[in-house]
Image: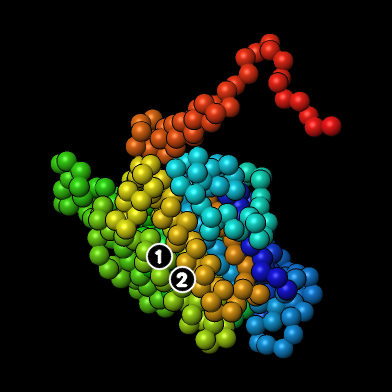
């Protein structure tokens, strides 16, 4: 077996959901009395044969046929932001750790996307069009919302097949008990039930907690009620992805020690607005906050990949990296303090510098280069 590394950086929801569910339906063959769910099909389909799984013939151990799954989802990352898709340096920060997924695994170019965070995350979790689950748009605050409770997420069949399941990061498929990740198949979760926009509320002029309550960072375990940990404000917005990275690493360590297969949904909040990098990355690139966030995101992904290698589980682990949907135009500000102008000016400046030593040939003149005989 080889490590399956899949880079779906085109917010390719259909491709990512298909990859996830092809694993889920195959490992379910080892769990008799469990209903199956296939991509886009809902309930009631027969599971695929265990022999169809590329991991099914692994010999010996109790995780044979049950590869670990590390599913990394980032928020509002555009198609051309990372190096392997033409971004990276041209966006202000190289992304070598994320690019390594393309080098060592498979890179996907097809773009099949839902329009917003909630519908795309619904499709990824269920393998179904979001409109079937009541999650076809981002809900406004204060209105009834969340993934319909009879829906089946990928965590449920994987849990029934013996997987340890965890979500760390952004959920956005329901913010009340009964509709949180620990109610939808996850053994544990930590993060925000809704979205990062809300971290700005408490620092906005005229804000009142009597009118709009502070949003919370939460955690919970299966069979228990989720609890609020602290306010999700602009300070925590800068810090939260550090914790979202640490928790999957700790979860992998525990499951590797126990010899139990795992499904980790690591849902980073970056680079969603507000554009606020962690203080440790502030100013690191010299290309503004967005580029600093890109560098931080690449580092966080790298820490999770390092954990897979360090724990000796790379040969039986599928890693998928993707985004929920494209970049938000509100994040693009045409100033020198953004991810567009400064990096491009540096590239233009470097090009102009080379022309001093090797001047450009005016149009219409013959090429002075004479090939060697």
Q: Position of residue 70 (x, y in %)?
A: 55, 67
Q: Residue at x 37, y 64 (%)?
A: 242
Q: Nearer the viewer, residue 183 or 163?
A: 163
Could you tell me which residue is drawn at 59 percent across and 79 percent down?
312
| 296 vs 159: above or below | above
Q: Which residue is mark 1?
A: 244
Q: Is residue 46 left or right of residue 324?
A: right
Q: Quarter holding the N terminus?
A: bottom right
Distance in Å between CA atoms under marks 1 and 2: 7 Å
Secondary element type, mark 2: helix
Q: Which mark is residue 370?
A: none
Q: Name the residue carrying label 2.
A: 248
Marks 1/2 in contact by CB < 8 Å: the verdict is: yes
Q: State the residue in front, 263 or 181.
A: 263
Is residue 61 shown left or right of residue 296?
right
The spot of residue 326 in percent (x, y) is 51, 42
Q: Residue 337 at what x, y percent from top left?
A: 34, 37
**Quadrant of residue 247 in the image?**
bottom left
Q: Nearer the viewer, residue 230 or 7?
A: 7
- The residue shown at (69%, 82%) is 64
Could you tell whether 214 is left or right of 188 in the image?
A: left
Q: Quick check: 254 above or below 370?
A: below
The residue positioned farthest toward the front in the image shown: 373
Residue at the top extreme, as displayed:
364
| Residue 131 appears in the rendering | no
Is disc 2 surrounded by few (<14), some (14 to 19) or many (20+) residues within 10 Å?
A: many
Vertical placement of residue 80 versus 313, above or below: above
Q: Quadrant of the C terminus?
A: top right
Residue 259 versus residue 267 in the image, above or below? below
Dot 1 falls on a residue whose secondary structure is helix
Horizontal and vertical percent for residue 110? 66, 45
């Amino acid at each position: 077996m080889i490590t399956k590394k899949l880079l779906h950086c085109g917010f390719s929801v259909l491709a990512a959901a298909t990859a996830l569910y092809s694993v889920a339906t195959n490992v379910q063959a080892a769990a008799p009395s469990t209903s199956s769910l296939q991509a886009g099909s809902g309930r009631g389909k027969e599971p695929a044969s265990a022999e169809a799984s590329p991991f099914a013939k692994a010999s010996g151990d109790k995780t044979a046929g049950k590869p670990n799954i590390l599913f990394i989802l980032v928020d509002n990352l555009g198609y051309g932001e990372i190096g392997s898709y033409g971004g990276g340096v041209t966006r202000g920060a190289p992304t070598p750790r994320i690019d390594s997924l393309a080098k060592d695994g498979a890179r996907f170019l097809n773009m099949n996307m839902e329009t917003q965070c909630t519908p795309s995350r619904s499709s990824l979790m269920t393998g179904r069009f979001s409109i079937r689950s009541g999650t076809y748009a981002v809900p406004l605050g204060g209105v009834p919302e969340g993934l319909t409770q009879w829906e089946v997420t990928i965590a449920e069949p994987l849990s029934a097949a013996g997987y340890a399941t965890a979500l760390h990061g952004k959920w956005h498929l329901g913010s009340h008990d009964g509709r949180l990740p620990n109610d939808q198949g996850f053994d544990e979760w930590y993060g925000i039930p809704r979205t990062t926009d809300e971290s700005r509320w408490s620092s906005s002029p005229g804000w009142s907690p009597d009118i709009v309550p502070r949003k919370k960072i939460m955690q919970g375990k299966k069979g228990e009620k989720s609890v609020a940990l602290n306010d999700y404000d602009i300070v925590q917005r800068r810090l939260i992805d550090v914790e979202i990275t640490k928790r999957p690493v700790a979860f992998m360590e525990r499951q590797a020690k126990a010899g139990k297969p795992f499904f980790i949904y690591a849902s980073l909040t970056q680079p969603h607005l507000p554009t606020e990098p962690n203080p440790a990355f502030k100013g690191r690139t010299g290309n503004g906050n967005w580029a600093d966030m890109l560098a931080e995101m690449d580092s966080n992904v790298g820490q999770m990949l390092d954990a897979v290698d360090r724990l000796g589980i790379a040969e039986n682990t599928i890693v998928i990296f993707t985004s929920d949907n494209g970049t938000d135009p509100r994040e693009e500000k045409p100033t020198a303090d953004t991810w567009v102008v400064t990096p491009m000016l540096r590239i233009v400046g470097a090009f102009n510098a080379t022309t001093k030593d090797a001047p450009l040939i005016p149009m219409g003149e013959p090429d002075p280069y004479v090939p060697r005989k």
